[in-house]
Image: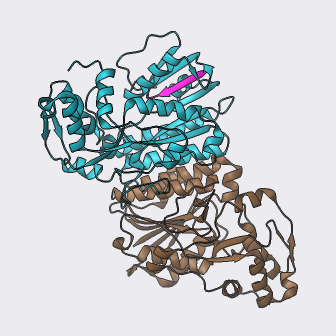
Chain colours: A brown, B cyan
Amino acid sequence: MKVLITGGGGFLGSRLAAALLARGTLGARAITRLTLLDGAFGSRPEHPHVSVVEGDITDAGVLEKAVAKDTAAVFHLAAVVSGAAEADFDLGMRVNLDGTRLLLDKLRRCERPARVIFTSSVAAFGGELPEVLDDSTTPRPQTSYGTQKVIGEYLVSDFSRKGFIDGRSLRLPTIVVRAGKPNAAASSFASGIIREPLNGERSECPVAARTGVWLLSPRRAVDAFIHAYELPPQAWGANRVVNLPGLTATVAEMLDALKRVAGAQVAERVLWKPDARIEAIVKTWPARFRTARALQMGFEADADFESVVRDYIADERIRL
Amino acid sequence: MKVLITGGGGFLGSRLAAALLARGTLGARAITRLTLLDGAFGSRPEHPHVSVVEGDITDAGVLEKAVAKDTAAVFHLAAVVSGAAEADFDLGMRVNLDGTRLLLDKLRRCERPARVIFTSSVAAFGGELPEVLDDSTTPRPQTSYGTQKVIGEYLVSDFSRKGFIDGRSLRLPTIVVRAGKPNAAASSFASGIIREPLNGERSECPVAARTGVWLLSPRRAVDAFIHAYELPPQAWGANRVVNLPGLTATVAEMLDALKRVAGAQVAERVLWKPDARIEAIVKTWPARFRTARALQMGFEADADFESVVRDYIADERIRL
């Protein structure tokens, strides 16, 4: 079977690719071709089944190369992140909305309806919210990124209803701990305050210690992508969107776990530097959810924040 | 002030235009220019303040003619109706989604943020629904038309949050009684079973007598457009979408009112001719709402279905 990952050169995309190559199968079928599409690749995986397409998802020629007529599985991760989509409205609309629309239109021409996993986000929610959100909470995003993700969900649902694709949208919590460099996501600090201190570097925290974050580790996110794919259509029914399970941790609790795992001198490398722009975006995101539907469907959250930190240390081969 | 009505040649658009010309003002400002944009016009209103633009809303040249730099008020009614958008997916996406997007992008270039009334629809809702919907019910449309309308709402909300426009989205009940000819809307029957018998003609009803319809008269719809415009921004706050008040009537209740107003021989001109395609679309639409927010904001429904029929007879100068 042919599998496509958009954003396949990114943080989650490359981890998903590695996991798929390690498994070799998806939904009990052998993966014969894994296409990774991204604007740029740091390193290109060397594997006989992998092909890499470098380019813009809104470019018809690029999509032509990335989507084969018999593509069976698509993980659509490519996106301009929240902070960047807020700073550059046109860029966010083009990549996050037009890009999704063009991809879906292209997939519609496949020989059989491809199964499509769309990565939406907790940023779908905002404004006046209940203390604890649940499966009935209506998305009212307060960022352009969140708006573009919600619109993507509605497109995926309608394309699925029409039988053009078999789509499933996952509202991801903030992914923590992301490896690599800080990025333009407003949530970048949530990984930075763990990652940089573990690298022996200082990290600036732009939000207050009491700020709660609804989070999921990269390991559990990759598990969720694969699980979402492997669930049969009847497990989804007419509702093709789900809030993934996550873990609520305040910045204070996160630093406390870091201290327990790596010691006080590591945790003390975090400096407090309030940033009104970041605070304004992050405070529109909800921190607590009841995710009854996702749990019933078999999706899983991390056990606690200490294991999130320990998994990161193991995955990145960090020596304490 | 300059006012634009997209779909200004259509049933509601032309009535809104007539109402605005009769008032001469909007939000206490004199209307100096009323531009009507539509694909085609049956009759063009002769009035020194009216200019007519005939063309496709997705055509940049047409939008250039319709949107002046100092356009202050926009009523965006242009749309491909539900049945047509379901039958021709690409047409619905192009006009209802791309058309709205292009209009908003054009308005973003105005000298000051225009106040924009977007006509969404009860078709935003579908699937598994509570018996009575309320302001917290999440839209899960089961038609492409409904999907395109919900996406339009999210665009209008985000463009408003960014300060590009001052937008307000109204989820209209089914408009009954529409004058003129049957159209491709799946709800066309709801007007047809009143209009055709009053014209001395037979009308085929494609749904069962017990089918409930959530409806609003053209008079109250035009009132709602103007009221939505004249409410100050703080009456809307961050939430720019509202379910308009309406009236629930079953087909049986509608025919009963027709009988009381026009006599049994008129009501007996309705023939029962079940149509599975229409039934399938209409049954996904909800029939009962609690519209607390709209009522609190001062929007009004019709008193009862008999007054809906009487208003239609008066407006269309029908002699019984």
Out of B219 and A174, give the one closest to the viewer.
Answer: B219
Say which quadrant the N terminus of chain B sits in: top right
Q: Visible in this render: residue A46?
A: no
Q: Position of residue B162 (x, y in %)?
A: 67, 44
Indicate the quadrant containing the C terminus of chain B: top left, top right, bottom left or bottom right. Answer: top left
Is residue B175 at all visible to an observer of this figure?
yes
**Above or below, comparing residue B225 to residue A156 in the picture:** above
Residue at position x 57%, y 55% in the image:
A140
Residue B225 versus residue B110: which sits nearer the camera?
Answer: B225
Tell me what residue is drawn at x 32 percent, y 31 percent.
Answer: B307
> Where's residue B254, x and y in %?
24, 39
The span shown in magenta is: B2-10
Q: Is residue B5 magenta?
A: yes
Q: Is residue A152 magenta?
A: no
* Percent of width and height locating residue B75: 51, 31
Which of A50/A318 is in front? A318
Residue B2 lies, with reference to residue B236, above or below; the image says above
Locate residue B110 relative to residue B197 in the image: left or right.
right
